[in-house]
Amino acid sequence: MGKTPVRMKAVVYALSPFQQKVMPGLWKDLPGKIHRKVSENWVSATLLLAPVIGTYSYAQYYKEMEKLEHRY
């Protein structure tokens, strides 16, 4: 009951030079896909971006007021 060696075949994957369409479905109808994602998730995007933009604009305003306060 000894171990007998088994021949393994190597498998090599390659793209044919005549078929280079790797991801054609990714770029097909890209504006339509983007429009669909935005129209489905506009509420979530608004709820995410509104506090971020509001906080940033408040920080910029506060920084500007600090500069003007110590002007003279």
Image (cartoon, grey):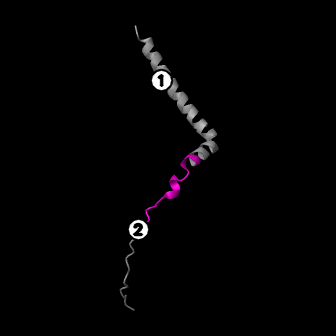
Instruction: Say whether residue 60 is magenta.
Output: no
Residue 29 lies left or right of residue 68; in this view the side is right
The verdict on residue 17 being magenta is yes
**Number of numbered labels in the structure image:** 2
Left or right placement of residue 51 versus residue 19 in this view: right
Give the secondary structure at mark 2. Answer: loop
Residue at image position (58%, 47%) is: 32
- Few, some or many residues within 10 Å of mark 1 (<14, 14–19, 20+): few
Asked if the residue at tag 2 contacts the one at tag 1, i.e. Cβ–Cβ closer than 8 Å, the answer is: no
Instruction: Tell me residue 65's x, y (percent).
Output: 47, 16
Q: Position of residue 70 (x, y in %)?
A: 41, 12
For residue 3, above or below residue 32: below
The answer to whether residue 16 is above or below residue 23 is below
Outermost residue, bottom direction?
A: 1
- Secondary structure under the numbered disc 1 in the rendered image: helix
Please tell me which residue is depicted at 36% across the width and 88% down the height of the picture.
Answer: 4
Query: In this picture, is 34 found above or below 56?
Result: below
Mark 1 highlights which residue?
A: 60
Q: Amino acid at mark 2?
A: Ser
Q: Which mark is residue 16?
A: 2
**Helix, strand or loop: magenta stretch:** loop
Magenta-highlighted residues: 13-32
- Within 10 angstroms of label 2, few (less than 14), some, or many (20 or more) residues? few
Q: Is residue 14 above or below residue 8?
A: above
Residue 56: x %, y % from top left: 50, 28
- Seen from the viewer's position, the closer of residues 50 and 33 is 33
The three-letter code of the residue at mark 1 reads Gln
Q: Which is more N-terminal, label 2 or label 1?
A: 2
